[in-house]
Structure formats: C-alpha cells, structure tokens
C-alpha cells in the first residue's frame, strides 16, 4: 500500500510563497478521533523529556495531570471555529476543542480522610483499612512533592509499609506522659533510646514518629519545637471540649502547661494567639469571648466550602486570621481572594472582612 | 492513565477556519484545496472560494497527543497557525481561470 507521505507532495508549506495542495488523511475518521490537542504548561513539557506523567482523578471528578512539583486541572476549551491539524500537507484532524491545564491545589485533604479511617492507637490490632504510599497516590491525584509535603504537615508517618496518622487522643496522652517523664528525669539531653527504655510498650518507630510531631531528631537526640510542645496543651484541652470561654481556656491552658511542659522548653515569648494559630479561633459567642477549635487541616479544601465554613463560625475576620486558613487552599493570592469573596468593613480602626458569598 | 513522549516529535501546523466545516461525504483521502503560503499572508482556495488569512508563530506551542489504549503519547507539536478569519469570497471568473491552471 502506498504511504501517504509518498503519495502527496512533501514540500514544506512554510516556504515563502509556496503553493501546495492540501489533502485530508486517508484515515481522517480514525486519526481525528485519536488525536487530542493539549496546551501543556512549559514545566510539564520539560518533565515529559525525562519521565512519564500521570493523569487521573476520581471517577466523577475532572481529570488532573501531575508533574513532580505541581498539579493541573484539565479543562476542555471549545471553539466554534474549525481547527485543521496538518503534518506536511495532510490534514489529520478537524477539531473544535483544545485541552487546557490550569494550575490547582490538588484535593490533598482526601489523604487526611483516608488515613483517619484507621488512625494509630495503642490498640493497633483492631485497625481497619490502611494505605501504602502507592495506594494513596492512586487515590489522590497530586504530584509526589505535594503528597509528601502534605503528609509531613499532618504528622503522618510510615509504619510497617503503610502511612498512618495518630489518633489525636492517643498522641496527646502519650506525649503528655513523655513530657512528665522528661520533667522527672531532667536529662541534660533527651536521648530517644533512653526515652524508649522508659516506655517499652511503645514500638520504637512509633516513639520516633510521636516525637517528630513535636520536634526533630538529630542522630539519637530529640530537639523539641517549643511551639509544637505548647500546642499539645491546646490539643489536649480541645480533646475534652470543642469550645471554651476565653478566660476559662487561658487559665486551663496555663495550668496544663505548668504541669506538662518540660521546663527547658518553656518560652514565655510565645503568646496564646501564636500557639493557637491554625488550631483554634477567637470569636464572640453569646456576648462573651470564646476560643473555638478549628484545625486548618481538618476543614474542607474546596475554597467556597471552606469560606462558608469559616464565615459560619465567625462572621468577621481580620486578614491575619484568614491568611492562616486560606494560604494552602488556592493558587489565587490572598489579596485577590479577599477582593473576590469578601467585603471589607471598618470596626473602629480595625479592618475586618465579611463574606460576599451569601 | 500515563502520558509519555514519542521518540520522535513531529512538526504539525494548525489552520483555523471561521465556523464549522460542513461536508456531506466522508472526507478520508479527499483534496481540501490549495494553500498559497506567502510567509505572513496566506491564501486558501477551496473549490470556487478563496480565503485570505495570516500565519503566526504560537508563543506557546500546542502538543498533539495520540490516544493509545489507556495511555497517551505526545507525538507532535504545533508551532505555526494560519488563521482565516474572513468569510470565503467567490473567485471571479478571470481569477478562476488562473486558479484552474494552478490547480491542474
């Protein structure tokens, strides 16, 4: 059978003043349905030089394409014009659409939902479904870098081939016990091996993962992150009640901190507001100031759902407060988000934002 | 679904025509017309009509991707586009004679 390329002239049509007959491919019907046009971002084109890219997403959602660093939503852009796609002088496709790729924040919060199906507790034998990294990557379409970064943010850890998060009550209880032990022992340096000897019932890998949720481990020495140590006190109080009167919370917080924060980690320069950032918000309820638990990793990552949730908890926010909850959920900058979704109001000399959505 | 790149990337071109291309028969293997490519200014003769357009180099090339079973392969890039944004004009008789000679 004669090749198409041999049958038709192959003179390049880009020659100035060239004249050339154009033909439809002999297999136009077939090639037209097989070829797609993609406006791929330069970073994906560069990555394609060296590796393959993964396209996916949940059955009912739009497709997402991920590179090693970022994820893009694939959106079909239709045109009423006819786009003829030619190689040499042969038309291989007549198209009315091009697939565009929009940079997005992938639905990483689904990972939290999956890992929270069976959080790690002392009674891990009763666990239900657990997920390996590959299973998570298949379920949640995002780049490797985005998934790994998110796993770190939610204090997830790999244990016996599966990624897990701690049951929050278990984590706080064990860390409180560890902090009390540190106060009792008053070691100059906290050697993880020595801590492990004091808690033989906790698997060593679990002890490491627990300590890493409140600091770093350099060789065998634990170095605490002061902010995270104080945050244990806040999490502990919120395990009992979801919301406190402001004064009541602050008194309970100080008492608890005195009891469990290892004295070497006491840093009076941290304010309660700083400690509660991303964990809880201050609001007025029934004419009294209160502190309500609001974990930024546990509310919806859908921007409009998140905004609705935030403004239903508290109708007026400062920019600083909103920044904590809106930074990781959209590629749109905070000033643009505020302009699009909020109304600016003045309360005395303070600038506050209310919702434009309802 | 996996997207990979073919070993050899072909050079494709795009012709954009205003509106829908309507046809009553299968186009496979048929002649579309004659293209006169004058660098920036281009002409396309289809039957008794002539279209005038202009060529442009795309600032962001478009990838041509082929579906293959459950996977996708990038087989080419489109860097050049010729846009025929005006309505097709009928070829006057005298021009038609000249065009006929050209098309022969």
Image (cartoon, rainbow, N blue to C red):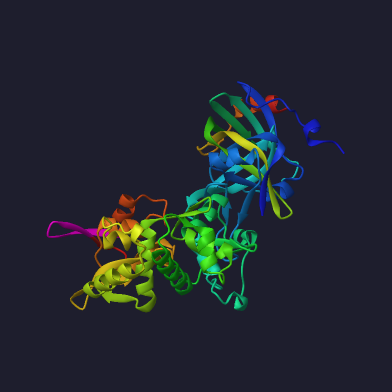
Q: In percent of the image, x 52 and y 69: which residue is there?
A: A199
Classify the position of the N terminus of chain A by image quarter. top right
Is residue A1 positioned above or below A310 on the image? above
Is residue B15 positioned above or below A117 on the image? above
- Asked if residue A230 shows in the view, the reply is yes
Give x and y (percent) for residue A47. Answer: 60, 41
Give x and y (percent) for residue B25. Answer: 71, 50
Q: Is residue A211 left or right of residue B67?
A: left
The magenta stretch is A341-352
Give x and y (percent) for residue A157. Answer: 55, 61
Is residue A19 positioned above or below A190 on the image? above
Residues A172 and B65: in front is A172
Q: In percent of the image, x 28 and y 56: which residue is there?
A: A320
Classify the position of the C terminus of chain A by image quarter. bottom left
Q: Residue furthest left?
A: A348
Q: Is residue B104 left or right of residue B13?
A: right
Q: In percent of the image, x 39 and y 66: which residue is there?
A: A232
Q: Is residue A209 left or right of residue A11?
A: left
Residues A291 and A181: in front is A181
For the stretch drawn in magenta, the main secondary structure is strand
Reply yes or no: does residue B38 show up in magenta.
no
Q: Quadrant of residue A24?
A: top right
């Amino acid at each position: 059978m004669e090749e198409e390329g041999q049958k038709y002239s192959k003179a390049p049509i880009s020659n100035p003043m060239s004249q050339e007959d154009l033909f439809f491919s002999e297999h136009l019907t077939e090639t037209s349905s097989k070829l797609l046009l993609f406006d791929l971002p330069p970073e994906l084109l560069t990555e394609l030089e060296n590796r393959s890219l993964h396209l996916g997403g949940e059955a009912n959602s739009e497709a997402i394409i991920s590179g090693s660093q970022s994820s893009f939503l694939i959106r079909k852009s239709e045109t009423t014009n006819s786009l003829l796609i030619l190689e040499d002088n042969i038309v291989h496709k007549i198209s009315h659409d091009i697939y565009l790729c929009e940079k997005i924040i992938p639905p990483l919060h689904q990972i939290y939902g999956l890992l929270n199906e069976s959080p790690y507790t002392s009674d891990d034998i009763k666990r239900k479904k657990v997920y390996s990294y590959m299973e998570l990557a298949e379920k949640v379409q995002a780049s490797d870098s985005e998934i790994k970064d998110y796993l770190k943010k939610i204090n997830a850890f790999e244990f016996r081939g599966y990624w897990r998060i701690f049951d929050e009550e278990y984590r706080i209880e064990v860390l409180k016990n560890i902090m009390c032990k540190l106060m009792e022992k008053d070691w100059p340096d906290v050697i993880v091996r020595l801590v492990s000897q004091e808690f033989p019932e906790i698997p060593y890998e679990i002890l490491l993962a627990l300590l890493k949720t409140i600091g770093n481990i350099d060789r065998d020495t634990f170095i605490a992150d002061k902010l995270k140590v104080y945050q244990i006190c806040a999490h502990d109080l919120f395990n009992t009640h979801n919301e406190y009167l402001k004064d009541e919370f602050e008194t309970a917080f100080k008492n608890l901190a005195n009891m469990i924060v290892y004295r070497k980690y006491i840093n009076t320069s941290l304010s309660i507001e700083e400690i509660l950032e991303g964990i809880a918000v201050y609001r007025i309820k029934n004419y009294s100031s209160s502190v309500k638990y609001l974990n930024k990793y546990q509310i919806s990552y859908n921007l409009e759902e998140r905004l609705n949730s935030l403004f239903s908890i508290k109708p007026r926010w400062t920019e600083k407060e909103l920044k904590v909850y809106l930074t990781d959920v959209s590629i749109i900058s905070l000033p643009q988000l505020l302009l699009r979704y909020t109304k600016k109001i003045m309360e005395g000399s303070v600038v506050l934002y209310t919702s434009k959505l309802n | 679904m996996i997207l990979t790149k073919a070993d050899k990337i072909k050079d494709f071109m795009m012709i954009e025509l205003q509106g829908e291309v309507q046809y009553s028969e299968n186009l496979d293997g048929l002649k579309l017309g004659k293209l006169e490519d004058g660098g920036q200014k281009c002409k396309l003769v289809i039957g008794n009509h002539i279209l005038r357009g202009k060529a442009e180099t795309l600032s962001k090339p478009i990838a041509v991707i082929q579906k293959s079973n459950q996977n996708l392969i990038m087989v080419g890039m489109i860097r050049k586009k010729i846009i025929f944004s005006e309505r097709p004009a009928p070829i006057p008789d005298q021009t038609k004679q000249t065009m006929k000679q050209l098309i022969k």
